[in-house]
Image (cartoon, rainbow, N blue to C red):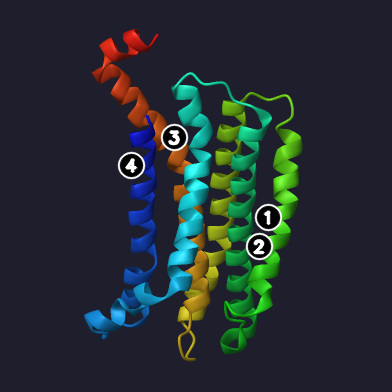
Amino acid sequence: MKRWAVLVVFLYFLLLVALTAPLFFAGFSPGANAIDAFMIFSEWVYWAALGVMLVAQAVMLLVPVALSLGRPTTRRSVLWPILASGLMVGVLGAGAAISIDEFIRKEKAASLDAGLPWVAMLVLWAAWSIAFYRTSRGAEAMDVVTRQCRYLLKGSILELLVAVPTHIVARGRDYCCAGVLTFLGIAFGVGVMLFSFGPGVFFLFAARWKRLHPQLEQVAD
C-alpha cells in the first residue's frame, strides 16, 4: 500500500511539472530554445514550491494508507490532512487574488514577490484549517479526508471560474507578458483539483491490488 501511495505522489509530481514550466513557455515564450525553457528548473524556489505540494499530497494519503493497513487512526493523524487541506485553500486564494489583481491593474499588477498572494494564502490557510478542524469533530478519519477532498474540488472549480475568464481578458491586452499572473492562477486551480483526486486514485490502486492478490489479503487478515 505504501508503494501505491508513493506512485500517486510521483504521478502528481509529473503533472505539476507539466502544468508549470512546459506549458508556461509554450504559452508565453514559443520561440525560446530548450536551454531557456528549462532555466526554471535551476531555481530553488520552483523546487521548494513543488516540494510543498508533494509533501501535502503525501500527508493526505497518510490516513488512507493507515486504514488500508488496518492501523488505528488518532486525532493527531487527522490533524496533518487538515493542515494540508487548509494550505491548498490558501493556494486557491492566492491564485484568485493574483488573477483579479492582473484583471484590475493590468501591467501594474503585483508579482509573486509582492505581499498580496502571500497574505491571501496565509490568512485562508489559518482560517480554513480552523474550520476543517471544527467540522471534523466526532467524524471518522476517512470521512474527514473525503470531505476535505470534496471541498477542495469545489473550491478549485470556483477558483478556475475566476482565473480562466480573467486570463482570457488579460491575453487580449497589449502590454508585455499579458496574462502571466492569470495563467499562474489557472495552474494553481488545476494543481489543487488534481491534488483533491490523490486519495481517490490511491483507493483505485488499492482496490485493484486487493483483487489481484486475494491470497495475501487472507494471510494479512
**Mark whose residue sits in front, 2 or 4:** 4
Residue 177: x, y in percent? Answer: 45, 86
> Can I make out residue 30 in this image?
no
Identify the residue under disc 3.
200
Disc nearer the start of the sequence (3/2)? 2
Label 2 vs label 4: CA separation?
28 Å
7 up-or-down from 50: above or below = above
Q: Which mark is residue 125?
A: 1
Locate the C terminus by quadrant.
top left
Label 1 vs label 3: CA separation?
23 Å
**Do the residues bearing badges 2 and 1 touch, measured as CB atoms within 8 Å?**
yes
Identify the residue under disc 2.
121
In the rendered structure, the answer to whether residue 83 lies left or right of residue 46 reads: right
Identify the residue under disc 4.
7
SS label for mark 3:
helix
In the rendered structure, the answer to whether residue 163 lies left or right of residue 13 reads: right
Label 4 vs label 3: CA separation?
13 Å
Residue 92: x, y in percent? Answer: 59, 58
